[in-house]
Image: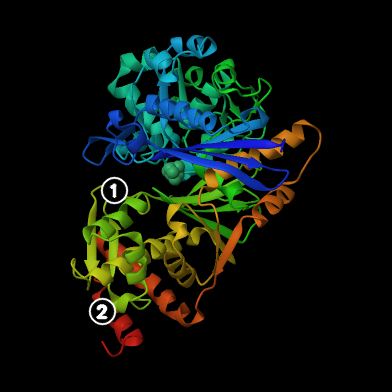
Amino acid sequence: MGSLFLGLDCSTQSMTGIIIDFGSNKIIYKDSINFDKALPHYKTQNGVIIIDSEMVIHSYPLMWLDSLDLLFTRFVQKNLPIKDIKEISGSGQQHGTVYLNKNFEKKLKSLSSKESLSDQLFGCFSRKTSPIWMDSSTSQQCKEIRDSLGGMEATIKITGSNTFERFSGPQIRKFFQEEPDNYKQTKIIHLVSSFLASILLGQNAPIDHGDGAGMNLMNIKTKEWDPRALNATAPYLKEKLPELLPSFEIIGKISRYFVEKYGFDPYTLVLPWSGDNPNSLIGVGLIEKRKAAISLGTSDTYFGYLDQLYLDYNGEGHVFGAPTGDYMSLICYKNGALAREKIKNKFGLKWKKFSELLTKTPPGNQGKLLLPYFLPEIVPLVLNPKVYRFGLDEDDLKGNIRAIIESQFLSMRLHSEWIEEKPLEIYATGGASANKEILQVLANIFNSKVRKFETTDSAALGAALRAVRSYYDFHNETKTWKEIVNTFLTSQLSDFILPNDDYKDLYDDMVELYKKCEVFVLRNGENPEPFRQKFIKKYFPNE
Ligand code: XUL
C-alpha cells in the first residue's frame, strides 16, 4: 500500500468517504454518515429543512462540518492508514450557497484540534442556513436576472443555462433583497463544494469550473465571473466570491487541524472540490461521446460528456464544466428518489418487493401513466406540485409502481432529446442503480445497453480518481483520463443490462403519449385520451 487517495461527497442526505488504492485498483474503505440518523439534533428530514411549504428548502453548513469530523473519527477508530493518503478531493451537492462573515478565514487559520469544527466556526456565518438545490423559491429573481441579461437566449449564451430557481445567482439575489444587512455582513459566499474544500485547506478555496457553471454567474466560454451576470445579481458580488479555477489544479496542503486531530500527513495535497455531477462523470468513466450516465439519487440526473460547448436553447438543460477541462450536459429532476419512495411507502413496501412487483406488469403498463410531480419539478418547470394519473387508479399497487418508474425514464428520454446524439450505452449510478429491475426499464425505454457498477457512489469515487490524476500530473508522471478510468473502473464493473428490442416501438410511441400528457397538463394542450386509447389498442388489444 502507499498510493491512497480520498474522495469525499457531501450530498443531500449524507457525507461519504471513499479511500482508493490506485496501486492495486481497490476501494479499501467506504463509509457514509447519514445526516438524519447520525446528527438527529439538527432535525433534518432527508438531510434538509423545509422552511416554507415545499418551496424554501435549506440545510445546515454546521451539520456538514459535524459529519466531516464524524467521518474522520470513524477512520481513526477503524485504524485506517490515514497517513498514506496522498491527496484529497471532494464533491458537493451543486448550487447550494454558504454565507460567511469576516471572521471565517481568520478562524479557519487558527483551528484547534482539541475542539470540533462546528464549535469553532459557529460564529462565522452571516446566514445560519444554506439554500440548496431543492429550493424553488426564486422565480422572481430568475426573471429579474434573465431580463437584465437580455432574455432566455442571451442568458443561456452567457452562463450555459437559463436562470433556474435552485441556481446560486438567483438565490444570492434573493438573500440580498430580503436580508440586505446580512448580505452586507457577508465577506465570502461559497458553494457547498468550495466551502468544504476551504475547511480542508484552512483558507478560502476556489470554486471550480464544474460547480461554478451552476450559478448563472460564470461565463461558460471564458470560465470567468461574468460582469453582466454579477451586476444583474447583487452589488459588490465579485468581492464576495472566491476565484474560479480548473478542477485539476492542486490548491495546497491539508490544514494542521486534520493533521493533529486525525493523523493526516502534513503533505497531503488538496484538489478543488467540484459538484456531484461533474465528479460522477469521472466516477463512471464518462470521458467520451455517445455515452450518457443516469444518476438515480435524491435528484435524478441525466448527463453526458461534451467535447465542445453545446447549448440547449429550449432552456431546460445545462452545460457545466467537466473535470477534464471540457464540458458536460445535464438535466436534473427533483422527483427522483423521494418520488419513488412516496409510491413505495404509500403501499408499505420494501425495495425487494417493489422490484418484484415491477416485473409483474408489462412494459407500457397497459397504457396507465402518471406525471410524478410529488415535489415541485425542475424539468419541466412545475412550481405547484401535483401528481396526474391517466387511466391509473391511485390504489392500483402494481400499476403505480410501473408508472412511477416508466414516467421518470420517459421524461428523461423526452427532455434529453436536445443533446441530439442517442447514447449507445448508458452508465447507471446512484442508490437506485443497485436495482436491476429498475435498470431493465431504463434499458428498454432508451433502447440502449445499461452498465451497472459495483459501487453506487460515483461522486465520491470520481473525486478520488480526480485526485489520482492531478497527483501524478503534479509529480510529472502524466496519466491520461482513459488510463485512470479504464484501469480503475474495469476492476469495478459488474453488469450489463441489455434492452429488449421487442419494446422499441412501444416505447417510441409511449414517449409521444407521455409528451402529450405533459403538454395537456402543463400547457393546456389537447386531451391525450384519444392517443392513449390508440396506444392501448395497438399494444394491449385484449385489454
Ligand atoms: C444538479 C442538481 C442536483 C444536485 C444534488 O443540477 O441540482 O443533482 O447537484 O445532487
Looking at the image, is mark 1 or mark 2 nearer the viewer? 1
Q: Measured from the top left, where is residue 396 in percent x and y? A: 21, 70
Q: Measured from the top left, where is residue 312 in percent x and y? A: 50, 52
Q: What residue sits 30% from the left and 29% below the top? A: 42
Label tally:
2
- Under mark 2, the amino acid is Pro
Q: Is residue 55 above or below residue 506?
A: above
Q: Are marks 1 and 2 in contact (CB under 8 Å)?
A: no
- Under mark 1, the amino acid is Pro
Label 1: how many Cα within 10 Å (few below 14, some 14–19, many 20+): many
The response on whether ligand 1 sits within 8 Å of label 2 is no
Q: Quadrant of the C terminus?
A: bottom left
Is residue 274 shown left or right of residue 536? right
Secondary structure beneath dot 1 equals loop
Q: Earlier in the sequence, mark 1 or mark 2?
A: 1
Is residue 515 shown left or right of residue 498? left
Residue carrying label 2: 530
| Residue 526 in view here | no
Q: Is residue 103 above or below residue 13?
A: above
Residue carrying label 1: 376
Is residue 331 shown left or right of residue 495? left
Q: Nearer the viewer, residue 152 or 476?
A: 476
Secondary structure beneath dot 2 equals helix
Q: Measured from the top left, where is residue 126 in percent x and y? A: 36, 17
Is residue 424 shown left or right of residue 35? right
Q: What residue sits 47% from the left and 52% below the top? A: 430
Label 2: how many Cα within 10 Å (few below 14, some 14–19, many 20+): few
Q: Nearer the viewer, residue 483 or 205?
A: 483
| Residue 505 in view here | yes
Q: Is residue 541 above or below residue 488?
A: below
